[in-house]
Amino acid sequence: MPAVFEKQDFDVFKLDGLETRMSEIQSRIQPKFEMLGQELVPFLSEHVNEEMHLHIARHARRTINPPIDTWMAISSSKRGYKKLPHFQVGLWDDHLFVWLAFIYELPNKSNIADSFLTEFDDVISTFPEDGWISTDHMKKEGKQIREMNDGDFMRVLERFKNVKKAEFLVGKRFLPTDHVIQNKEELLKEIKQIYVKLLPLYKHGIQVQSS
């Protein structure tokens, strides 16, 4: 079985020019997002007991600079995802990411952060041990959970609460050479396991969002 994501997919982000890079994203990567979405959307819909919807980044506002990453998102809204807790799968030039994302567009992210801080132990128990945390979806940098302690987690959540542009993303990252992304069934199984682990955190965030 061919790899889901191949080295050439990651190399797309090394191509010069908006049109050239976007053409490759549309022809190479977006069909793979569609394929993953066909499995992950009904899976998440069943697990959250609510209809979920696939959104694929179109990068439509770009007129000069080519995108440095691309992604798919799954949320409970058909119209969009940025103002809701949502699930992501995407690529930078050197890794694939699988996130549960709480980004800065959330209208009441300080309330969500407060709730996470109040129930801190329950929140950090959902983190994958071999996972990653990011505080900005527009930057490639992240922190490995195994290298963080409770104080580090607390500071991430406090910053998420107090800084307008601060974000909170938790999940896993995979290298282009990692075996798991070489096989569709293995990759889908891994993504589903990550999402199931993070589902309590997602449901917690949605409950605060809607209260």
Image: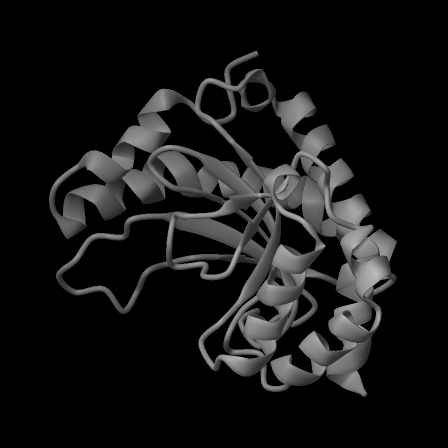
- Quadrant holding the N terminus: top right
Residue 147 picture location, percent across and down: 60, 40
Answer with left or right where residue 178 lies relative to residue 30.
right
| Residue 142 can be seen in this image | yes
**Image quarter of residue 129:** top right
Q: In front: 177, or 140? A: 140
Is 82 above or below relative to 70?
below
Residue that appears at 26% across and 39% down: 13
Colour scheme: one colour
Please state the total of marks drawn on the protein image.
Answer: 0
Q: In front: 190, or 172? A: 172
Residue 186 picture location, percent across and down: 68, 22
Answer with left or right where residue 167 lies relative to residue 64.
right
**Image quarter of residue 145:** top right
| Residue 79 can be seen in this image | no
Residue 192 picture location, percent across and down: 74, 39
Is 49 above or below relative to 10?
below
- Quadrant holding the C terminus: bottom right
Residue 22 picture location, percent across and down: 25, 47
Residue that appears at 70% across and 68% down: 76
Is 111 above or below relative to 160?
below
Is 19 above or below relative to 205?
above
Residue that appears at 81% across and 65% down: 203
